[in-house]
Image (cartoon, rainbow, N blue to C red):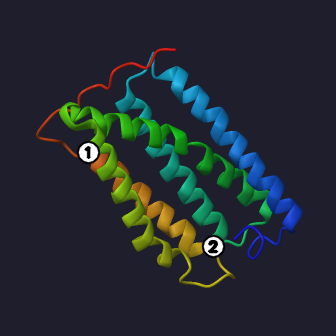
Amino acid sequence: MIQNVLGLSTTQYTIVFAANALGMVVVGALAARLTTRIRAQTLLTVGQSAMLGFGALVLILLLIHAPATAVLPALFLQVCVFPLIAGNATALAVARAPHAKGTASALMGALQFTLGALVSPLVGLGGPATGLPMAGTVVAGATLGLAARLLPSRTPTPDPAPVTG
């Protein structure tokens, strides 16, 4: 999408990719530090809400054919909040099965790969000339994830053990 829709060169794409990766590393390190002060449930909800908000912004910007200078910062922010989701969702899920942490981890990994295989064709539906399917898939996924997080559960989610170090 960055090259085909936004018109960036291979070199520019590489720079954008590196910047997004650096942003994820920085947010991931920050998220790890925050888990000692803020509950994982809160960080997860913040991350999911931010993913939905920035995803919707990217979708709107693509719909109005905004220039790369408008889309790329929104896309950067969307990508950067992922560590708030991934680490906290994993910790919370594994905390629900303290007697079978390995099994819980294996099941989550298998589920992630299965969902990725099922959803990835949706991203390419419009061909290489549009980013709308990608943005729509992100918004749909973020909406479903946030709804699942906020809907009442019959059993409370335990706090994961704090990470020290």
Identify which residue is drawn at 53% across, 29% down: 31
Local SS, label 1 = helix
Residue 133 pos. (x, y %): 54, 75
Residue 110's place in the image compared with 82, above or below, is: below
The alpha-carbon separation of the residues under discs 1 and 2 comes to 36 Å
Q: Are marks 1 and 2 in contact (CB under 8 Å)?
A: no
Which of these two is toward me, 49 or 158? 158
Q: Which residue type carries mark 2? A: Gly
Identify which residue is drawn at 78% across, 54% down: 16
Residue 52's place in the image compared with 118, above or below, is: above
Residue 76's place in the image compared with 84, above or below, is: below
Residue 58, picture quadrant: bottom right
Q: Relative to 98, is 52 on the left or the right?
A: right
Q: Quadrant of the N terminus?
A: bottom right
Q: Which residue type carries mark 1? A: Thr
Judged by depth in the image, the label closer to the viewer, 1 or 2, is: 1
Residue 22 pos. (x, y %): 72, 41
Identify which residue is drawn at 39% across, 57% down: 112
* Residue hosting label 2: 131
**Callout 1: 10 Å neighbours few (<14), some, many (20+)?**
few
Residue 40 pos. (x, y %): 38, 29
Q: Relative to 7, is 42 on the left or the right?
A: left
Q: Relative to 27, is 18 on the left or the right?
A: right
Local SS, label 2 = loop
User: In the image, which disc is placed on residue 103?
Assistant: 1
**Callout 2: 10 Å neighbours few (<14), some, many (20+)?**
many
User: In the image, which disc is placed on residue 39?
Assistant: none
